[in-house]
Image: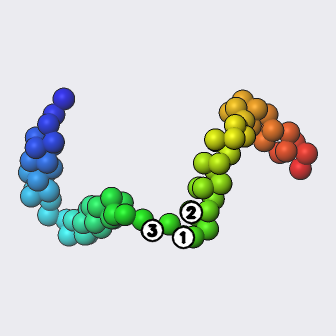
Amino acid sequence: MATVDNIRNGLIDKILSIRNKDFLVALDKLIASSSSESDIIELTKEQKIMLEMSEQDIKNGKLISQDAMDKRNLEWLNAM
């Protein structure tokens, strides 16, 4: 498996050979958008409340299996 440095260097070599400006602009946007994914996202008050409620449900054993949830969803969809 290639190391991060090998992958990065290979990408740099390939980028240096690209002459299409539109392609490079699109690539730049793609790279810029992916780097923002690592930024810290601030949750809203409502999102924090929902997460706290979920934690309480887990602590209180208010859980449902994936199979049971799938069955419930199918029943709901068929009732429509």
Q: Residue at x 68, y 45 (%)?
A: 57
Colour theme? rainbow
Residue denoted by label 2: 48
Q: In screen coordinates, is 51 left or right of 29?
A: right
State if disc 1 and disc 2 touch (CB < 8 Å).
yes
Q: Residue at x 81, y 38 (%)?
A: 72
Q: Is residue 37 above or below residue 6?
A: below
Q: Earlier along the polypeptide chain: callout 2 or callout 3?
A: 3
Residue denoted by label 1: 44
Q: Is residue 9 visible?
A: yes
Q: Residue at x 83, y 45 (%)?
A: 77
Q: Quadrant of residue 50?
A: bottom right
Q: Position of residue 29 (x, y in %)?
A: 30, 67
Q: Is residue 7 above or below residue 12?
A: above
Is the residue marked by circle 1 packed among few (<14), some (14-19), or many (20+) residues within 10 Å? few
Q: Quadrant of residue 62?
A: top right
Q: Which mark is residue 42?
A: 3
Q: Position of residue 8 (x, y in %)?
A: 14, 48
Q: Position of residue 17 (x, y in %)?
A: 10, 56
Q: Position of residue 9 (x, y in %)?
A: 9, 47
What separation in Å lies between label 3 and label 1 (alpha carbons)? Answer: 7 Å
Q: In screen coordinates, is 48 left or right of 12?
A: right
The N terminus appears in which quarter of the rendering? top left
State if disc 1 and disc 3 touch (CB < 8 Å).
yes
